[in-house]
Image (cartoon, rainbow, N blue to C red):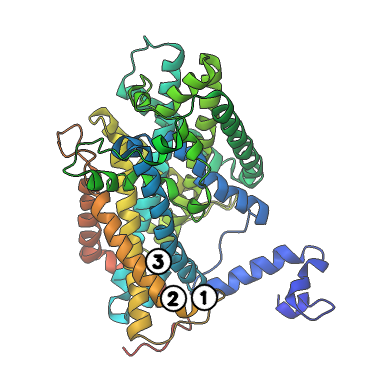
């Protein structure tokens, strides 16, 4: 179907909504056009529209939720003042990464397609490495969300029964149950997922209002100086400044998403926080804050349940994104058994095996909880290492293209003249952040407190090139090889 069929009274595409059903058909046509330039066949049909995809992103990022339930390690590392400073600074620095990625996505809207900016001699391997890194990061994102949900349920049990004998295997069993539920919603229930996102997004907003009211009205408050001038070296590093910077791992986990800098009202949480909350029997400072504010186990449990539900649905949305990343990378032949992983169910309109692999990854990686007291820290460390390495690789190739290559292909959204400066800052910030992400949570390292994220990352990065040179390069074509209108690189 040609665009001319949608010309309205002004002869422009802005009026496609005047034709019944034209908007959906026009969107599908544009999807096919974009994928055609990238040498791909459009297999998945849009199930999300503007409202549902906006709701999807709000839920998947759930910024205020994670500020409350996953900020304990950051508060312990730098105090309220230190953590707020790191949170704000990281938000604005990370935004340059978001801008760089947005421009790349406008040019090459497909997984691994950003390697189009690299020199032709290294495009294939660069896109291969980027594909593995991005796939690993999204899978870890699913795992961290499901693992956090399981931990919170165990903590919620302790709210009403402090004599409960909490054991690591219980968290793993809870993770298994939540991951199985996420798998079900993304396969059998996939057709209803878009509609469900709208209701969960409404619940997200209502939950935010409830939390603000309860903490603002009922909780004892710290003074402004106590909140913003409390800089602690809680983990015992050699200097307070360095100790505060180690809070970046927690801060970056909270702001993954383009709206990170816009959610600063969560400082209300810090006005209610005291160092005594870190010793909560539940393992979560926010549960102790709820208890102190309401004076009721029932109310504390109700508020905690809001966060559990929203964290679960955020992780469920990560399953959707992670499975699509797996599917896209397998479609390019980058994984073992790629042909099977890249199959889309005709009945469910989803890559079912990719969803199952995401489920299996969560279950297996969560086993580290059985031997490590900082399993959640290791999981988010692995997620951030993979993600920021992807950023460094992708943005590095874009910088090289701007400096040494042909002009960038035409695209719908551009950084303009500020592009190179923004890209360079984002690249340097990525390296800076990585230096802190790989650190352990404390300078005194034991087997139980070691940051196992870099170890697991190294294992994946050893396997990936070995697989590539052992035979994977024969099946991996790479998205860039199929790109049309790539530019005029001198080969």
Residue at image location 32% in from the left, 71% down from the top? 396
Q: Which residue is mark 2?
A: 419
N-terminal of the pair, mark 1 or mark 2, is 1
Residue neighbourhood size for the residue with mark 2, other residues' Cα within 10 Å, grouped as few (<14), some (14–19), many (≥20): some
The count of marks equals 3
Check contact, mark 2 vs mark 3: CB within 8 A.
Answer: no
**Which mark is nearer the camera, 1 or 3?**
1
For marks 1 and 3, give the CA distance.
19 Å
Check contact, mark 1 vs mark 2: CB within 8 A.
Answer: yes
Q: Is residue 443 above or below residue 406?
A: above
- Res. 112 mark: 3
Residue at image location 14% in from the left, 36% down from the top? 444
Residue at image location 32% in from the left, 85% down from the top? 404
Q: Is residue 335 visible?
A: no
- Res. 414 mark: 1
N-terminal of the pair, mark 2 or mark 3, is 3
N-terminal of the pair, mark 1 or mark 3, is 3
Q: Secondary structure at mark 3?
A: loop
User: Residue 330 vs residue 297: left or right?
Assistant: left
């Amino acid at each position: 179907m040609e665009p001319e069929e949608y010309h309205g009274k002004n002869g422009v595409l802005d009026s496609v909504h005047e034709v019944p059903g034209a908007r959906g058909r026009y969107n599908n046509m544009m999807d096919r056009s974009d994928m055609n330039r990238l040498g791909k066949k459009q297999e998945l049909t849009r199930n999300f529209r503007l409202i549902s995809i906006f709701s999807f992103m709000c839920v998947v990022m759930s910024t205020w939720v994670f500020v409350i339930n996953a900020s304990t390690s950051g508060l312990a590392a730098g105090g309220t003042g230190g953590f707020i400073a790191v949170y704000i600074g990281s938000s604005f620095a990370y935004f340059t990464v978001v801008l760089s990625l947005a421009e790349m996505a406008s040019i090459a809207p497909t997984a691994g397609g950003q390697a189009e900016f690299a020199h032709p001699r290294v495009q294939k391997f660069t896109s291969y490495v980027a594909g593995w890194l991005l796939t690993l990061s999204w899978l870890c994102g699913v795992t961290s969300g499901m693992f956090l949900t399981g931990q919170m349920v165990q903590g919620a049990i302790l709210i009403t029964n402090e004599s409960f004998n909490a054991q690591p295997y219980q968290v793993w069993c809870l993770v298994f149950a939540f991951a199985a539920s996420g798998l079900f919603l993304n396969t059998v229930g996939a057709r209803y997922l878009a509609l469900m996102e709208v209701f969960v997004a409404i619940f997200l907003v209502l939950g935010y209002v409830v939390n603000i009211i309860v903490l603002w009205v009922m909780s004892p408050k710290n003074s402004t100086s106590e909140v913003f001038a409390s800089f602690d070296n809680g983990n015992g590093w050699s200097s307070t400044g360095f100790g505060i910077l180690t809070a970046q791992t927690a801060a970056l986990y909270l702001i993954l998403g383009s709206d990170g800098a816009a959610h600063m009202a969560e400082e209300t949480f810090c006005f209610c926080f005291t160092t005594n909350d870190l010793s909560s029997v539940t393992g979560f400072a926010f549960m102790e804050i709820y208890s102190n504010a309401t004076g009721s186990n029932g109310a504390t449990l109700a508020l905690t349940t809001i966060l559990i539900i929203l964290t679960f649905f955020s992780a469920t949305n990560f399953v959707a994104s992670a499975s699509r990343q797996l599917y896209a990378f397998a479609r390019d032949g980058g994984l073992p058994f790629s042909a099977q992983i890249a199959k889309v169910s005709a009945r469910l309109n989803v890559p079912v095996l990719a969803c199952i692999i995401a489920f299996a990854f969560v279950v297996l990686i969560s086993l580290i909880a059985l031997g490590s007291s900082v399993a959640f820290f290791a999981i988010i460390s692995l997620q951030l290492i993979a993600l920021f390495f992807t950023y460094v690789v992708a943005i590095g190739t874009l910088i090289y293209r701007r400096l040494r290559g042909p002009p960038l292909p035409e695209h719908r959204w551009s950084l303009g003249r500020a592009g190179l400066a923004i890209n360079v800052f984002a690249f340097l910030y990525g390296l800076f952040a990585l230096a802190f992400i790989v650190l352990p949570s404390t300078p005194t390292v034991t087997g139980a407190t070691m940051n196992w994220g870099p170890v697991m990352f190294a294992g994946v990065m050893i396997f990936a090139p070995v697989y590539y040179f052992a035979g994977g390069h024969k099946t991996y074509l790479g998205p860039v090889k199929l790109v049309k209108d790539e530019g005029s690189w001198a080969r």
